[in-house]
């Protein structure tokens, strides 16, 4: 499974999750990890609900998201 350069826990496999970046080759996408981080109040709750996730998984998911939006400029319609 091809790793994403610079991320030893993020794998992109066309046969899993539609080729979306996943954590350690599991069927848990980076997007899902980010949703989990946004939803749960604390890391303890995350690890109780998702015992297969590790702190480094969360860290790399956040770092991956930061890299993915780095220097990206979007044109948003602004309401005055």
Image: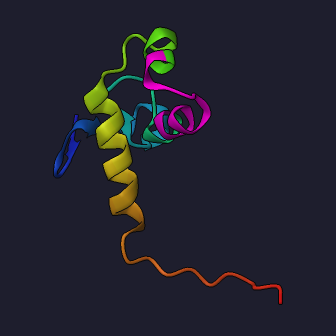
- In-front residue for pair 13/3: 3
State the scheme by which the image is colored: rainbow
Task: State the residue lying farthest toward the right.
Answer: 80
Magenta includes 37?
A: yes
The quadrant of the picture occupied by the N terminus is top left
The quadrant of the picture occupied by the C terminus is bottom right
Q: Quadrant of residue 74?
A: bottom right
Q: Can residue 12 be seen in the rendering of this structure?
A: no
- In-front residue for pair 27/16: 27
Q: Can residue 79 be seen in the rendering of this structure?
A: yes
Where is residue 60 drawn, in percent x and y?
29, 41
Q: Quadrant of residue 16?
A: top left
Bounds of the magenta span? 33-44
Q: Residue at x 42, y 66 (%)?
A: 69
Relative to 60, say whether 57 is above or below: above
Q: Left or right of 35: which side holds 70?
A: left
Magenta includes 65?
A: no
Where is residue 71 drawn, in percent x and y?
38, 77
Relative to 31, say whether 27 is above or below: above
Q: Residue at x 37, y 13 (%)?
A: 52
């Amino acid at each position: 499974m091809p790793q994403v350069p610079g991320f030893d826990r993020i794998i992109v496999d066309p046969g899993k999750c539609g080729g979306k970046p996943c954590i350690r080759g599991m069927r848990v996408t980076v997007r899902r990890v980010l949703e989990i981080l946004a939803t749960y109040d604390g890391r303890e709750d995350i690890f109780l609900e998702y015992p297969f996730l590790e702190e480094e998984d969360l860290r790399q998911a956040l770092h991956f998201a930061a890299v993915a939006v780095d220097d990206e400029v979007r044109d948003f319609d602004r309401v005055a």
